[in-house]
Image: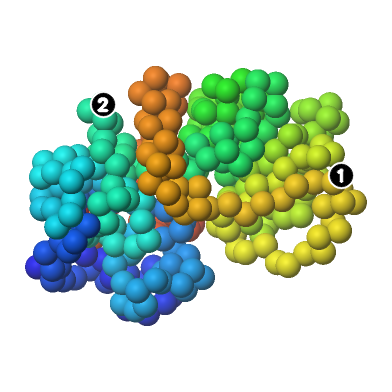
């Protein structure tokens, strides 16, 4: 029996239940992990609420990102062995003291990446990697707008975009978060509760606007985000922390400057193992270089998953949060 956090019915943080479960031996192509840390992400709340369907139905073990030590391997596994340190991103199962995992989705951790760093990096770090290097290839001289710049993805994105030579504009919810964003590479922090962020972007850029907007917030920042883009700019919606963006008339993109809009996910950018390993290697490299630091600002015992979700959804967190089994 191992401790885990399950969802038996969809709902708020109160539906997360801490209990003991049985786990079978690893099957063919699987490894068994003793987990050292699990990442806490907004996507976990989407599965909990039923916004994203669980691939295994109900009940399910929550969580999509984690890191741990291989303690057993199933038949056919040749590139991992007992004792290997690995991180992963897969649908569900991370909020547990131990778990089975498809070996092809596990990535060996470099010696200089800790379990907590990995649990905060695999989803958020690789998300930033594909957003800034694949979806829109940020270059020196670009101007980027990053919503929720003091959040888990935001702090990584600000640092990385800055390192690439971009001018980084971020939106934040408080003066404290503005200072945090600025300390992590954000050149201009906009207090979206007190300021019109479109007007401030126009002011900051001298009317030239942004090449790309990265939006993990969703409903409350749309369609105003489109007004922050110069003609032929790209709107990248990668999350829905404030709710899903409602259907809109696609002609809006034409009237606002022949804009591009996309809704990417890591699942597609890392669908092939070779792409997963490339994203992971690129992410670990930029972290190891010191250009990007992964701030783990909140740590919770596994049994306090409910509190972790409440803090996340109330915008009480900054940077990354992890559960510790």
For label 1, the crowd category at 10 Å Cα-Cα, with few meaning under 14, some 14 to 19 and many 20 or more, is some
Coloring scheme used: rainbow
The image position of residue 265, as x and y in percent, is: 53, 53
Give the left or right position of residue 212, taking residue 277 as reference: right
Q: Earlier in the sequence, mark 1 or mark 2?
A: 2
Q: Which residue is mark 2?
A: 112
Residue 276 seen by the camera: yes
Given residues 228 and 104, the one toward you in this image is 104
The image position of residue 207, as x and y in percent, is: 85, 31
The image shows residue 282, relative to residue 234, as above or below, that is above
Res 197 → quadrant: top right
For label 2, the crowd category at 10 Å Cα-Cα, with few meaning under 14, some 14 to 19 and many 20 or more, is few
Q: Residue at x 51, y 28 (%)?
A: 159
Res 249 → quadrant: bottom right
Given residues 49 and 268, the one toward you in this image is 268
Quarter of the picture holding the N terminus: bottom left
User: CA gap, disc 1 to disc 2?
Assistant: 45 Å
Give the left or right position of residue 254, taking residue 27 as reference: right
Q: Residue at x 38, y 32 (%)?
A: 281
Q: Residue at x 35, y 23 (%)?
A: 288
The image shows residue 287, relative to residue 67, as above or below, that is above
The image position of residue 141, as x and y in percent, is: 70, 21
Q: Which residue is mark 1?
A: 257
- The number of numbered discs placed on residues in the rendered structure image is 2
């Amino acid at each position: 029996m191992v401790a885990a956090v399950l969802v038996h019915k969809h709902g708020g943080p109160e539906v997360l239940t801490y209990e003991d479960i049985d786990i079978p031996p690893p099957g063919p192509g699987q490894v068994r992990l003793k987990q050292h840390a699990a990442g806490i992400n907004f996507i976990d709340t989407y599965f909990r609420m039923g916004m994203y369907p669980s691939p295994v139905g109900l009940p399910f073990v929550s969580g999509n990102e984690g890191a741990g030590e291989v303690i057993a391997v199933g038949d056919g596994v040749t590139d991992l062995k007992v004792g290997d340190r690995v991180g992963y991103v897969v649908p569900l199962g991370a909020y547990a003291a131990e778990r089975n995992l498809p070996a092809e989705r596990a990535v060996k951790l470099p010696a200089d990446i800790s379990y907590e760093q990995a649990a905060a990096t695999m989803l958020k770090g690789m998300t930033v990697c594909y957003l800034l290097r694949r979806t829109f290839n940020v270059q020196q001289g670009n101007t980027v707008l990053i919503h929720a710049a003091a959040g888990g993805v935001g702090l990584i994105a600000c640092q990385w975009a800055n390192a690439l030579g971009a001018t980084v504009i971020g939106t934040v919810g408080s003066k404290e978060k503005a200072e945090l964003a600025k300390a992590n590479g954000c050149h201009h922090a906009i207090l979206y509760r007190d300021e019109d962020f479109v007007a401030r972007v126009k002011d900051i850029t001298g009317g030239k606007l942004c090449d790309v907007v990265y939006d993990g917030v969703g409903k409350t920042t749309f369609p105003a985000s489109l007004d922050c883009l110069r003609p032929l700019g790209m709107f990248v919606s990668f999350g829905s922390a404030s709710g899903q963006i409602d259907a809109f008339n696609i002609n809006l993109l034409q009237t606002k400057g022949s804009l591009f809009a996309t809704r990417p996910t890591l699942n597609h950018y890392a669908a092939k193992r070779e792409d997963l390993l490339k994203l992971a290697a690129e992410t670990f490299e930029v972290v190891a270089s010191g250009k990007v630091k992964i701030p783990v600002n909140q740590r919770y015992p596994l049994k306090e998953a409910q509190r972790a979700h409440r803090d996340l959804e109330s915008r009480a967190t900054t940077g990354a949060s992890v559960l510790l089994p």
